[in-house]
Image (cartoon, rainbow, N blue to C red):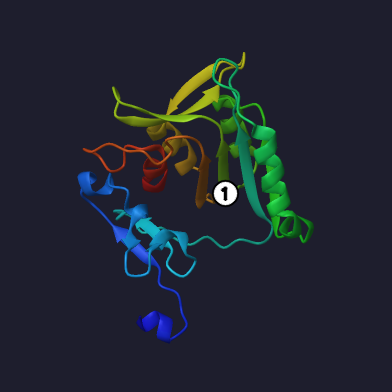
């Protein structure tokens, strides 16, 4: 009510250390008085916030902001319309690309070795993954499906990928366009792919 009176927005930051509470779908918070889901309004964005033991240092960026888009579509998994997602990404950023504010590099060869080589050769600020993801119940870890040399699926644990990306000092944002990318464990709030990358 106070924000509405001041004509401002309210960001709802959910800080959850308890894995059981973190597993709840907080994005479904609902205000019955106005018949509205809070997360669906730009006036009340909902952000999950994870307490981290290290302070993240800001990085000074001279434009362009460099984005590495890794597209993984293994032949032994259901086909994804990755071209449609690539097209939407380019269309939504067209003005920023043409002004030189953002530069996008596409990585079609979605193998770990190619990703490592690309990160050694260039500086990136954003890592955007387009592909399959899942949560491995046995390992209690989020995995992303990259590719092997013959385009077959290669399940890469989020802990391993997180360590790889951690060493790329300029990287500050990871976007996962993958199923179950935010799914985690009830025992460890950092077990999911997204959570593990945030931690790393």
For the question of whether residue 49 can be seen, the reply is no
Which residue position is annotated with label 1?
A: 126
- Residue at figure coordinates x 38%, y 34% from the top left: 159
In the depicted view, which residue is nearer to us: 140 or 56? 140
- Please state if 138 lies on the left or on the right of 90 as rendered: left
Quadrant for the N terminus in the image: bottom left
How many marks can you see?
1
In the depicted view, which residue is nearer to us: 11 or 106? 11
Q: Position of residue 146 (x, y in %)?
A: 53, 26
Quadrant for the C terminus in the image: top left
Q: Is residue 55 above or below residue 117?
A: below
- Residue 143: name its quadrant: top left
Q: Position of residue 15 (x, y in %)?
A: 28, 58
In the depicted view, which residue is nearer to us: 146 or 84? 84
- Please state if 77 lies on the left or on the right of 103 as rendered: left
- Residue at figure coordinates x 41%, y 34% from the top left: 158
- Residue 118: name its quadrant: top right
For label 1, count other residues whose C-alpha is less than 10 Å away and answer few (under 14), some (14-19) or many (20+).
some
- Please state if 100 lies on the left or on the right of 184 as rendered: right
Q: Is residue 4 above or below residue 194?
A: below
- Residue at figure coordinates x 32%, y 64% from the top left: 32
In the depicted view, which residue is nearer to us: 175 or 78? 78
**Badge 1 element:** strand
Q: Residue furthest bottom?
A: 6
For the question of whether residue 42 can be seen, the reply is yes
Q: Is residue 35 above or below residue 122?
A: below
Q: Residue furthest right?
A: 98
- Residue at figure coordinates x 70%, y 60% from the top left: 101
Q: Position of residue 127 (x, y in %)?
A: 56, 44
- Please state if 73 lies on the left or on the right of 155 as rendered: right
Q: Position of residue 153 (x, y in %)?
A: 53, 18
């Amino acid at each position: 009510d106070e924000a509405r009176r001041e004509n401002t927005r309210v960001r709802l930051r959910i800080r959850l250390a308890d894995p059981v509470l973190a597993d709840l779908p907080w994005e479904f918070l609902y205000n019955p008085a106005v018949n509205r889901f809070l997360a669906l309004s730009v006036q009340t964005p909902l952000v999950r916030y994870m307490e981290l033991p290290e302070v993240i240092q800001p990085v000074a960026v001279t434009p362009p902001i460099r984005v590495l888009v890794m597209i993984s579509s293994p032949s032994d998994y259901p086909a994804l319309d990755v071209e449609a997602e690539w097209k939407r990404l380019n269309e939504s950023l067209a003005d920023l690309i043409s002004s030189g504010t953002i530069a996008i590099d596409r990585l079609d060869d979605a193998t770990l070795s190619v990703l490592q080589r690309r990160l050694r050769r260039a500086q990136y600020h954003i890592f955007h993954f387009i592909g399959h993801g899942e949560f491995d119940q046995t390992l209690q870890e989020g995995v992303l499906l990259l590719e092997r040399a013959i385009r077959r699926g290669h399940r890469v644990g989020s802990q391993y990928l997180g360590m790889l990306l951690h060493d790329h000092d300029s990287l500050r944002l990871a976007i996962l366009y993958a199923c179950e990318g935010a799914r985690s464990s009830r025992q460890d709030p950092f077990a999911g792919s997204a959570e593990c990358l945030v931690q790393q």
